[in-house]
Image (spheres, helix red, strand yellow):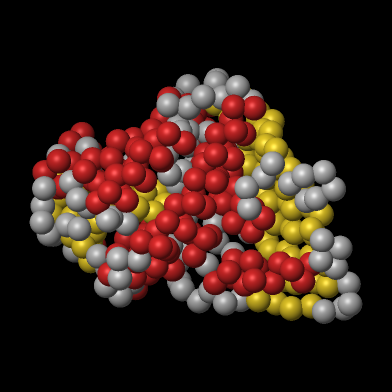
Amino acid sequence: MKLAVVGAGKIVAEFLPHAHEVPGLTIAAIVGRAASRDKADALAAAHGIPFVYTDLDACLADPRVDTVWVAVPNVLHADVARRALLAGKHVVCEKPFVLRTAELAELRVLAEDRGLILVEAISNQYLANVAWMRDNLHRLGELRLVQCEYSQYSSRYDAFRSGEVPPAFDPAAGGGALMDLGVYALHLVVGLLGAPETVSYTPRMERGVDTSGVAVLGYGYGDATAVCVCAKDSPGPSRTKIQGTEGAMVFDGPPNEIPVVELHLRDGTHERIALDHDPHRMTAEFRAFVRMIAEADLAERDRRLDHSAAVLDTAVRALESAGIRLG
């Protein structure tokens, strides 16, 4: 994978020091806005990235690039991904994939018509501990309740309260608690339980954006109910608990990195699972992306896209239930 990084924000700065841990991954270029060229230049210098662009089309025309990582504000995801696919590049798009189901459907057709890989970068779907949870979920018996929480006092919240509008708190940019932090909870729950029958979202609104909220996912009368809590206006702790008639799975911490899962069964069984050994939570997903592209694994692409589409539909239904429209 010869990757062009589109964006120079927090998630990019966080992952680049670990990119060398992914065999087969080469960071070929970085694209930043002209107004913040110094930021892109600094990242390129720090991580040995040979080319810096301020023109996306120029980067997309570069034959030394075969894949684009879309890491710009949420509202720009669809446009950048579309342009990359039309240029014949594979696309890895940060979460949330896009803001509307029609946008994902369009991107999927473009990828399918061109035989390209198109995937959402969502760390928890590639962690070994989550795979173990999925494989062992039946041991809990009949599922009853899921509680998945991700609360984190945003580093941008004070600026927002003082009158600024950073993208993370700008509904026009696709910001807000559900699409920033809550989407990790939705990915985890939908990845384990499938798409819900009913969805509702009760947000705390501040200046037109959800700074925190609670999403409730129903899986049919008499079946499981999942409660997803997300907050950018108050700290945690974050915790997930999955309860069934025969026991529970529990882990502490946010649902984007799950270092340890504990299983407690009614028969006295207690297991502690720690299968993920990568130093950074995003390493596993990029390793998977490299393999998918190298092997042209379109079946895996389609499976991942089916999951992402189910999560996006759930998120959109949640926002609509609260009268929130982004972008």
Q: With respect to residue 150, does 256 lie above or below?
A: below
Write down the quadrant of residue 230 in the picture.
Answer: top right
**Residue 76 in picture, x, y percent from top left:** 34, 35
Q: Residue at 78% across / 51% down in the picture? A: 224
In the image, farthest residue toward the right: 267
Residue nearest the viewer, comparing 112 with 92: 112
Res 313 seen here = yes
Q: With respect to residue 128, does 170 lie above or below?
A: above
Q: Residue at 44% across / 68% down in the picture? A: 284
Please state if 203 lies on the left or on the right of 92 as rendered: right
**Total numbered badges shown on the rendered structure:** 0
Write down the quadrant of residue 228 in the picture.
Answer: top right
In the image, farthest residue toward the front: 113
**Residue 31 in picture, x, y percent from top left:** 21, 46
**Residue 317 in picture, x, y percent from top left:** 60, 33
Q: Quadrant of the C terminus?
A: top left
**Residue 134 in picture, x, y percent from top left:** 64, 66
Q: Residue at 57% across / 51% down in the picture? A: 187
Q: Residue at 73% across / 64% down in the picture? A: 250
Residue nearest the viewer, comparing 133 with 220: 220
Please state if 35 lies on the left or on the right of 267 as rendered: left
Write down the quadrant of residue 32 in the picture.
Answer: top left
Res 11 seen here = no
Q: With respect to residue 318, does 89 lie above or below?
A: below
Please state if 267 lies on the left or on the right of 85 as rendered: right
Please state if 62 lies on the left or on the right of 92 as rendered: left
Q: Quadrant of the N terminus?
A: bottom left
